Image: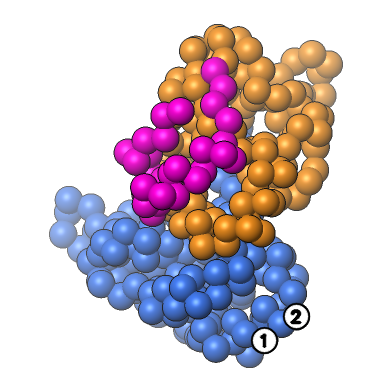
Chain colours: A orange, B blue
């Protein structure tokens, strides 16, 4: 299992943490065009993208027609909202090319929180860092348009 | 101190947590036009906006000319990147109208993490939820433009 310290979401972890996390994360690869999940699914996991790009799409009012709402590359986290709100997937997530992700499922996330709160803290700090960096970039992109 | 459960960043907290957090957060209000911080500052705190809107601006290559890079309203968290990376503020943050924020300073955040890891976990889950919701919205806004 490749748990690289280079990824910002693991920035605050130490060697022991990384060892321990291997029991909670699953590695998965997706072929181009393969879905990580589909809109309306009740599959709850966070995906930490480590390789490739994933596109998210939403159904429009025209049946079968979808609009792309986001493209996420390495160092992106997707699927957090559904995991925390326990609501159905609001979008379909599809691999645009060969993709690798580290999956953290609902149960594992809950166990991690409950049994290893300090490790969870360090992991969540990295997740917060990643998300805020991305949010900052997206605001800057929006600002550059107007 | 008004620590409302309504705010999504406090969604995972229980009554005891909210009591305890009052020792760590500071309430602050800003008048219209007042700066929360300026680009290049080394003041490290996260601001949980509870009322009003805050604008972030960045210096351009033309001295004294700034470009707006974001506008944040209630339920937004600002200042996380600087707090976690311990780098200078990359933008100036200015109150656009009467604003109230809950401030969580570097030291308090570190103490909270160290001494109350479980409470920290519940707080950070709410922060992650907020940030991912905003990120999702901003991607959808970008998608709507193109």
| Viewer-closest of B135 and A13 | A13
The magenta span reads A1-29
Look at the image and tell me in which quarter the N terminus of chain B lies. Answer: bottom right
Q: CA distance from mark 2 to mark 1?
A: 6 Å
**Local secondary structure at mark 1:** helix
- Disc 2 is attached to a residue of which chain? B
Residue A12 visible in the displayed image: yes
Q: Residues within 10 Å of mark 1 (few under 14, many from 20)?
A: few
Instruction: Name the spot of residue A57 as percent of width and height, x first.
Output: 66, 24
Tell me if residue A28 is in the magenta stretch: yes
| Residue wearing tag 2 | B15
Tell me if residue A6 is in the magenta stretch: yes
Instruction: Name the spot of residue A115 as percent of width and height, x first.
Output: 63, 58
- Residue located at (58% from left, 30% from top): A26
- Disc 1 is attached to a residue of which chain? B
Numbered circle sitting on residue B19 = 1
Q: Are marks 2 and 1 on the same chain?
A: yes
Q: Is the residue B143 above or below the residue B61 in the image?
A: above
- Residue located at (70% from left, 24% from top): A37
Residues at marks 2 and 1 touching, judged by CB atoms closer than 8 Å: yes
In this picture, residue B97 sits left or right of residue A133: right
- Residue located at (37% from left, 66% from top): B83
**Local secondary structure at mark 2:** helix
Instruction: Name the spot of residue A69 as percent of width and height, x first.
Output: 61, 30
| Viewer-closest of B117 and B130 | B117
Look at the image and tell me in which quarter the C terminus of chain B lies. Answer: top right
Residue A136 visible in the displayed image: no
Q: Is the residue B95 above or below the residue B136 in the image?
A: below
């Amino acid at each position: 299992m490749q748990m690289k310290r280079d990824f910002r979401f693991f920035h605050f972890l130490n060697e022991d943490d990384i060892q321990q996390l291997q029991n909670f994360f699953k590695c998965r690869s997706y072929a181009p065009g393969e879905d990580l999940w589909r809109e309306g699914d009740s599959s709850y996991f966070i995906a930490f993208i480590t390789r490739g790009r994933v596109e998210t799409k939403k159904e429009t009012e025209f049946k079968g027609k979808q609009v792309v709402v986001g493209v996420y590359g390495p160092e992106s986290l997707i699927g957090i909202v559904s995991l925390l709100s326990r609501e159905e997937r609001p979008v379909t997530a599809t691999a645009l090319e060969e993709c690798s992700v580290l999956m953290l499922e609902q149960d594992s996330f809950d166990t991690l929180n409950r049994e290893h709160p300090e490790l969870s803290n360090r992991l969540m700090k990295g997740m917060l860092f990643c998300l805020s960096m991305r949010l900052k970039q997206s605001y800057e992109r929006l600002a550059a348009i107007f």
